[in-house]
Image (spheres, helix red, strand yellow):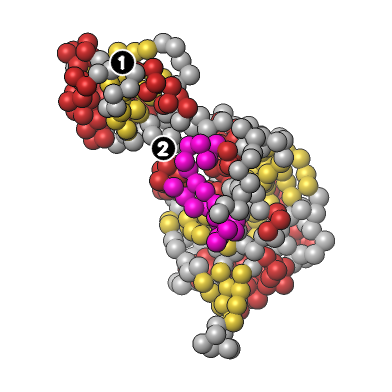
Amino acid sequence: MSNENPEKPENDHRTIGRKLDLFSFHDVAPGAPFWHPNGMAIFRELEKYARKVNDERGFMETSTPILVKTALFEKSGHWDYYRDTMFWFTNHRDKNEKLALKPMNCPESTYIYNSTIRSYRDLPIRLAEIGRLHRNELSGTLGGLLRVRQITMDDAHIYARPDQIENEVIDVLETINEFYSLFGFKPHYVLATKPESSLGTKKDWEQTEKALKSALKKFGADYTVAEGEGAFYGPKIEVHMKDSQGRDWQMGTAQLDSVMLPERFDLSYVDSDGSQKRPWVIHRAIFGSFERFIGMLLEVTGGNLPAWLAPVQVLIATISEEQNKYAQAVYTALKANGARVELDLRPETLNKKIREAEITKIPYIFIVGETESKEKKVTVRERGKKEQELISVNDFARFTEQKITRPNI
């Protein structure tokens, strides 16, 4: 039995997800989606994009444990601030051991940084991690993919000298802007400042807030200020968007930390004069979380995903069974070029096949009839357009590369 009310508005991502067979929710795992094959196709493409961006911008991928001792979060300060939103327990086989499912990657990232001596020449060091987190959100606040207990973050931590921070933050903002522009999104930027309860001195906060403001100004972003809404360890730039009901959600982020990780985990690098200095740390996420981003994407697009993200990119529809053999050959050629493709050989009318493909938001329909079969071509029908295009088998590689398998960047 699902823990999500199926009676939702048509533009709600839960309604769209059910119609497109992307995910489901069940009472055995409150706040954690069960991803169906169609949904995982979207998920994997976003992972692929995140890794591509990380590679291009000098990030090195890491992986850290999901289950760790609570002592880690006591050391970082998260235990005092976020204990109630963590899943933690005493090991029944060792009563002296308390363990937690990590709600964030930050503290563990420091163990990789500290695994060797760092020089000022090594910085910035950019460590990325795509991993699962768990947060004990109240059951009444859970809502589809937009607020969950199991979270997948496109996380990264940039360890840098103070003089490198501005350029690194600008690079993060450029990355975020480039990604959201793929979908025509126009997110709003928010600078969240020192909360009432926080780590560090007034000077620490003045320095880090000044650095973020300077980066925002040089980047040219319009932004508003959310007084007192920063993390307990540092200010942050948040990317905000609205869902189909007009509710505001935080998506990506760039948080600046000069106290929590550097001080509490004794982070250092050897400066040019041989002295030990503290790096600053930028906590970065482009999507925010895969779950929330996919939920927002479904609501903003109505499920009409760009072709590179669509679970099924091409449907091959035959007019009669005489074209089945050629349609199979077209299917094989498209698969070889990396397209996610389905073949409809049913003895149904072409109009019915097209109508069903449109309901499931498939971006392209390749129609195969007698003429197409003889000429070794297909008639291409693009979602939302009346015009049709006739292309040959020799054009398949170009077509898939330009219109299907690559983001329009």
Tags 2 and 1 touching, CB below 8 Å? no
Q: Residues within 10 Å of mark 2 (few under 14, many from 20)?
A: many
Q: Secondary structure at mark 2?
A: loop
Quarter-wise, where is residue 273 in the image?
bottom right
Amino acid type, label 1: Thr
Q: Which residue is mark 1?
A: 379
At 44% from the left and 47% from the top, the residue drawn is 36
Name the side, left or right, on which 378 lies relative to 239. left
Name the side, left or right, on which 402 lies relative to 140. left
Indicate which disc, 2 or 1, sits on the residue closer to the N terminus.
Answer: 2
Q: Is residue 107 visible?
A: yes
Quarter-wise, where is residue 257 in the image?
bottom right
User: Where is residue 145 shown, x and y percent of the image?
Assistant: 59, 48
User: Where is residue 292 shown, x and y percent of the image?
Assistant: 59, 46
In the rendered structure, does residue 176 fall within the stretch colored magenta? Answer: no
Q: Identify the main secondary structure in magenta.
A: loop
Q: Which residue is mark 2?
A: 311
Q: CA distance from mark 2 to mark 1?
A: 21 Å
Quarter of the image with the N terminus in it: bottom right
Amino acid type, label 2: Pro
In the rendered structure, does residue 27 fall within the stretch colored magenta? Answer: yes
Quarter of the image with the C terminus in it: top left
| Magenta region | 16-36
